[in-house]
Image (cartoon, rainbow, N blue to C red):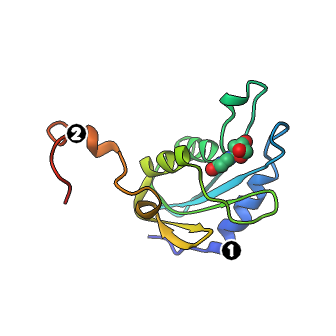
């Protein structure tokens, strides 16, 4: 597994944030993540005149992940327009969970946390496995 360089991830998130298209909220967001093969993927929010269909930065990030070869996310950093750490919204925690390695780390407003801590008892791919529906986990 690649070493996590949080400074590089923060810089990648800031660079992504500068590409945000946020004419409605005026709230640019940038997200960056380290992939288990060492790549860094990133995304920015892209809003829409039909407000509800705007895309969060994390949407772009997971699209970037697939487009550049897939893999699992191991570390994540998200910033707002002031370059401060931003918590991924609930929907985006679900998006990230799907593509995260177990124990993926996030820099959060309350320190370093795992994806499992910010999305407890998450619904995920394994819940769709046949015969797993009603069994208790672990
Ligand atoms: N936003 C993100 O891009 N990611 C999040 O996790 C939180 C919210 C965006 C959506 C919208 O364009 C703007 O921030 C204000 O909600």
- Mark 2 and mark 1 lie on one chain; the one further toward the N terminus is 1
Which residue does the numbered mark 1 point to in the structure image? Answer: 7
Between residue 102 and residue 63, name the one nearer to us: 102
Give left or right: position of 21 versus 67.
right
Q: Residues within 10 Å of mark 1 (few under 14, many from 20)?
A: few
Q: Is mark 1 within 8 Å of ligand 1?
A: no
Q: In this rendering, does residue 19 appear at all?
A: yes
CA gap between label 2 and label 1 equals 38 Å
Helix, strand or loop at disc 1?
A: helix
Residue 66: x %, y % from top left: 52, 42
The answer to which quarter of the image holds residue 20 is top right
Q: Residue at x 65, y 43 (%)?
A: 56
Give left or right: position of 37 versus 107.
left
Q: Which residue occupies the extreme top position in the image?
A: 50
Between residue 124 and residue 39, name the one nearer to us: 124
Q: In this rendering, does residue 69 appear at all?
A: no
Mark 2 and mark 1 residues within 8 Å of each other at the beta carbon: no
Q: Residue at x 59, y 49 (%)?
A: 89
Residue 4: x %, y % from top left: 55, 73
Residue 69: x %, y % from top left: 51, 46
The quadrant the N terminus occupies is: bottom left
The quadrant the C terminus occupies is: bottom left
Query: For the residues carrying marks 2 and 1, which lies nearer the camera in this image?
Result: 2
Q: Residue at x 66, y 29 (%)?
A: 53
Residue 29 bears which disc, if any? none
Which residue does the numbered mark 2 point to in the structure image? Answer: 129
The answer to which quarter of the image holds residue 115 is bottom left
Q: Is mark 2 within 8 Å of ligand 1?
A: no
Q: Residues within 10 Å of mark 2 (few under 14, many from 20)?
A: few
Helix, strand or loop at disc 2?
A: loop
């Amino acid at each position: 597994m690649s070493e996590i360089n949080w400074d590089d991830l923060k810089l990648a998130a800031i660079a992504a944030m500068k590409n945000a298209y946020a004419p409605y909220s005026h709230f640019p967001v940038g997200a960056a993540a380290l992939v288990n093969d060492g790549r860094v993927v990133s995304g920015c929010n892209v809003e829409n005149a039909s407000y509800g269909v705007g895309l969060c930065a994390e949407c772009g990030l997971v699209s970037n992940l697939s487009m550049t070869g897939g893999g699992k996310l191991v570390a994540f950093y998200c910033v707002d327009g002031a370059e401060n750490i931003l918590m991924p919204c609930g929907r985006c925690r679900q998006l990230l969970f799907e593509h995260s390695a177990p124990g993926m780390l996030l820099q959060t407003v309350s320190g370093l946390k795992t994806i499992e801590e910010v999305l407890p008892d998450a619904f995920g791919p394994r819940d769709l496995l046949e015969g797993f529906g009603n069994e208790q986990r672990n």
